[in-house]
Image (cartoon, rainbow, N blue to C red):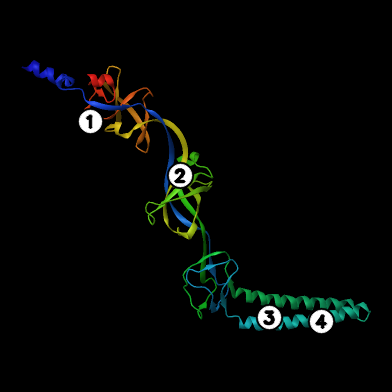
Amino acid sequence: MLSACGSGADAPSGAGPAPLVKVAQPAPHVFVDVIEAVGTARANEQVTIASPVAERVEKLLFDDGDFVRSGQLIATLDQAQEQAALQSAMAQEELARTQLERIQSLFDRGFATQAQLDQQVAQAAQARANADDARARIADRTIRAPLTGAVSLRTISPGTIVSVGDAIATVSDLSRIKLDFSVPETALGSLRAGQPITVTSAAFPGETFTGTVSVIDPVIDPATRALLVRAILPNPGARLKPGMLLEVAVQSARRSALAVPELSIVGEGQDRFVYVVGADGKVKRTNVQTGMRDNGVIEIIGLAPTNRVVTEGVIKVADGIEVQIEGDSQGRAG
């Protein structure tokens, strides 16, 4: 009785018909190495316009979120005193110019000395400088957009007294986005300017944005052993906003490697193995190393291209048992 029980346990293949399985040979597959990171979006250009003088705001010529052109007038500060000073300076300039012409005429006829001419030249130059100074002080009170873009929400109103350095508006060029993200120093050899990237955002589920690597920071942070990478993304419609958190995938390299369907891989702790069908129809457990996954296949190391790997019916087989291969005429006959 003991002998009979032992015989049945040692011969699982005799307990019933051989299990039917599907097999496939490892095939070359193109894998793309990807570096994943998280980055922060920044405007292509962004300027906070601050008041250069302490003065009262006279007019604000923009609304919240307006689109403005470079050089467009967006605010004026009170400039009554400066306008009066300019009128006085222009009058003095005209008087000095007339006096200079008169002295020059007298000098040419020998009725004025060189000293008188030099003095009048200096006075005319001083009058022009005074007029230019008045114009500059008026320009400081005339606020124009330094670039083309969208204006931020207003935080001041006409009549507000602003101090030197107080923000009047922020103008952002959102025609494209600068995306800064950190990668470990080990990825440095896989990065280069011009590499394509794909970006996703929680604000737009299921949508992907594309761009390219622009600049790689030449300095590595000694504390984190990471380096900063900047990418450029086109931003039609200004959908991406500065400050957004974006997930980045950088396609670093393309390579061809043997691959098998993911369902053929069996895990046991840290080990990975497959079942290979031999010429005698029996399966053999074979340890392998796995790599990248892509569209249902997985990179495999440790197999030959001619090996027949069990891809379906893996749970029905064990090391050393005989199997039937689906589609094999001899297996069907058996």
Q: CA distance from mark 3 to mark 1?
A: 93 Å
Which quadrant of the view contains residue 107? Answer: bottom right
Q: Which residue is denoted by mark 1 in the rendering?
A: 315
Asked whether disc 3 touches disc 4, contact meaning CB atoms under 8 Å apart, the reply is no
Q: Which residue is denoted by mark 3 in the rendering?
A: 86
Which of the numbered marks, if any, corresponds to residue 250?
A: 2
Q: Earlier in the sequence, mark 3 or mark 4?
A: 3
Three-letter code, disc 3: Leu
Q: Secondary structure at mark 2?
A: strand
Q: Which one is nearer the viewer's eye here, 279 or 194?
A: 279
Which quadrant of the view contains residue 85? Answer: bottom right
Asked if residue 327 lies left or right of residue 114, the reply is left
Q: Secondary structure at mark 4?
A: helix
Q: Earlier in the sequence, mark 2 or mark 4?
A: 4
Three-letter code, disc 2: Val
Q: Nearer the viewer, mark 3 or mark 1?
A: 1
Q: Nearer the viewer, mark 1 or mark 2?
A: 1
Q: CA distance from mark 2 to mark 4?
A: 71 Å
Q: Residues within 10 Å of mark 3 (few under 14, many from 20)?
A: many
Q: Which residue is denoted by mark 4 in the rendering?
A: 98
Asked whether disc 3 touches disc 2, contact meaning CB atoms under 8 Å apart, the reply is no
Residue 265 visible somewhere in the drawing? no
Asked if residue 124 lies left or right of residue 49, the reply is right
- Quadrant containing the N terminus is top left
| Coordinates of residue 308 in the picture (x, y in percent) | 32, 24
Task: Kindly give the residue lying farthest to the right in the view shown.
Answer: 110
